[in-house]
Image: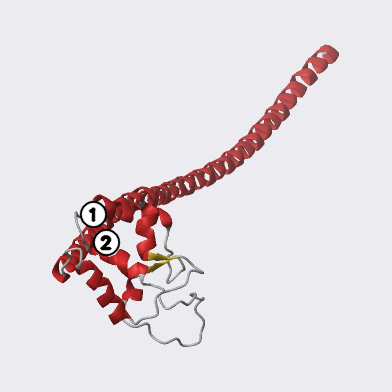
Amino acid sequence: MFKKFKSLFVIEEGEPTQEGQTPVEKTSTPQKETPASTRSFQVTTGSTGPGKVQDKFLEVLFDALEANNQDGFDYMEFKDFLRSLANVPMDDSTRYKSAFATAQTMGATKDKIISSARQYLTILSKEQAKFQEALSGQRDRNLTGKQEEIKQLEQTIKNKETEIDKLKADLEAHRQQIGSLEKEINAASEKLGQTASDFEATYQALLGQIELDVKNIESHL
């Protein structure tokens, strides 16, 4: 059924169009504007913009149309008649009138065909809304969620940078403290050394006097 629905709307690349011509790639050469006709509503698998027609999406949309296909002769059957006349050499007005003449033999009316077509447009609109909702969910998970994660990581980086700056300041303070302590040690060491030297000099002076007195006593007495 998917292939049948697809055949009503899709012109594969390389397949003849309604005028019996094969679509070609767009060039910079200006092209004549396509008249507002059935060609304007046919889906081509070639790229017509930033996006491309994908079978996976066509299948979803056609399945929705198929699930809501109305009983009796409606727009879909009329579209089938139009498709069957695609390669017949006639203008659009004659093609539509011919398809409608056949449709009338099956009890179809213009109002019913238009009404059913609009109902299918409503169905497609609902499918689009479902897609947008699903896309929004994917965007929240894959874009918004990751963007929020980036913000959190950026804040973490800032916090760690602040911590690093504080650690650097602490390290510098510790280095300065070490320098001060080393100066104090050097000063204290010099002072202790001088004190030791002074003590030794005083000791030797006093010792020398006593030893001299002992020697003189022993010698003179």
Please tell me which of labels 1 and 2 falls first in the chain.
Answer: 1
Image height of 18 relative to 8, above or below = below
Give the CA separation, mark 1 to mark 2.
8 Å
Tell me if I can see residue 212 in this picture: yes
Image height of 64 relative to 79, above or below = above
Q: In the rendered view, does 2 fall on the left or right side of 176?
A: left
Q: The residue under label 1 is which amino acid type?
A: Asn
- Give the numbered dot on residue 76: 2
Identified at 31% across, 64% down, the residue is: 80
- Give the numbered dot on residue 69: 1
Q: The residue under label 2 is which amino acid type?
A: Met
Tell me if I can see residue 57 in this picture: no
Q: Check disc 1 and report its element: helix, strand or loop.
A: loop
Q: How crowded is mark 1: few (under 14 residues within 10 Å), some or many (20 or more)?
A: some
- Toward the right, the furthest residue is 219
Q: Where is residue 37 in the image (x, y as percent from the top left)?
A: 31, 78
Image height of 144 relative to 121, above or below = above
Q: Residues within 10 Å of mark 2 (few under 14, many from 20)?
A: many
Q: Which of 125 and 76 is in front in this view?
A: 76
Q: Nearer the viewer, residue 145 or 64?
A: 64
Q: Check disc 2 and report its element: helix, strand or loop.
A: helix
Q: Which of 83 and 119 is in front in this view?
A: 83
- Toward the left, the furthest residue is 111
Query: How many numbered discs, if any?
Result: 2
Q: Where is residue 11 in the image (x, y as percent from the top left)?
A: 43, 67
Q: Do the residues labelled 1 and 2 touch (CB within 8 Å)?
A: yes
The C terminus lies in which quarter of the figure? top right
Identified at 28% across, 81% down, the residue is: 93
Q: In the rendered view, does 69 fall on the left or right side of 45?
A: left
Identified at 33% across, 50% down, the residue is: 140
